[in-house]
Image (cartoon, rainbow, N blue to C red):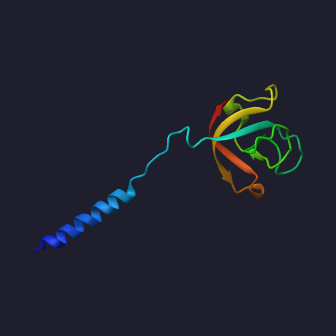
Amino acid sequence: MKSIQQTAAEAVIFLSLFGASCEKTASSSASLKDAVITGFDQRACPCCGGLMINFSGETQPYTGTFYLVDNDPAEFKISTASAFPIAVRVQYSALDKCFGKYVRISKLERK
């Protein structure tokens, strides 16, 4: 037969584990980061092409630290006819390919 102390200890452990497994989610706008899409990368190399994006406010292509977007530009209604730069807020993840200069955008909002 279990003692009251043993039952209470098990309850505390269970509730601690249950509480630790809960995950808070931030509001979607809090997880978005300001960025600028400066245009299409026209360089001809294995790790080139696609949209260029930076998180430092640069508005000129190939300026400062920029990343290439792994997504299809059509996902965001961007084409070669679009007017650049495009100020956006994005949720993204860095990719390991091509020396870490690629990102995948999971959410994009135009400013």
Placement of the C terminus among the 4 image quadrants = top right
Of residues 110 and 93, which is closer to you in this image? 110
Placement of the N terminus among the 4 image quadrants = bottom left
Residue lying furthest right in this view?
Answer: 44
The picture places residue 82, in percent across and down from the top left corner, at: 79, 26
The picture places residue 70, in percent across and down from the top left corner, at: 71, 44
Residue at image coords 49%, 44%: 26
The picture places residue 91, in percent across and down from the top left corner, at: 62, 42
Of residues 73 and 88, which is closer to you in this image? 88
Residue lying furthest front in this view?
Answer: 57
Of residues 91 and 56, which is closer to you in this image? 56
Question: Where 45 sits versus 57, above or below?
Answer: below
Q: In which image quadrant can residue 72 be found?
A: top right
Residue at image coords 86%, 44%: 62
Residue at image coords 86%, 45%: 63
Q: Is residue 63 left or right of residue 54?
A: right
Question: Where 30 sits versus 74, above or below?
Answer: below
The picture places residue 28, in percent across and down from the top left corner, at: 53, 39
Question: Where 79 sits versus 99, above or below?
Answer: above
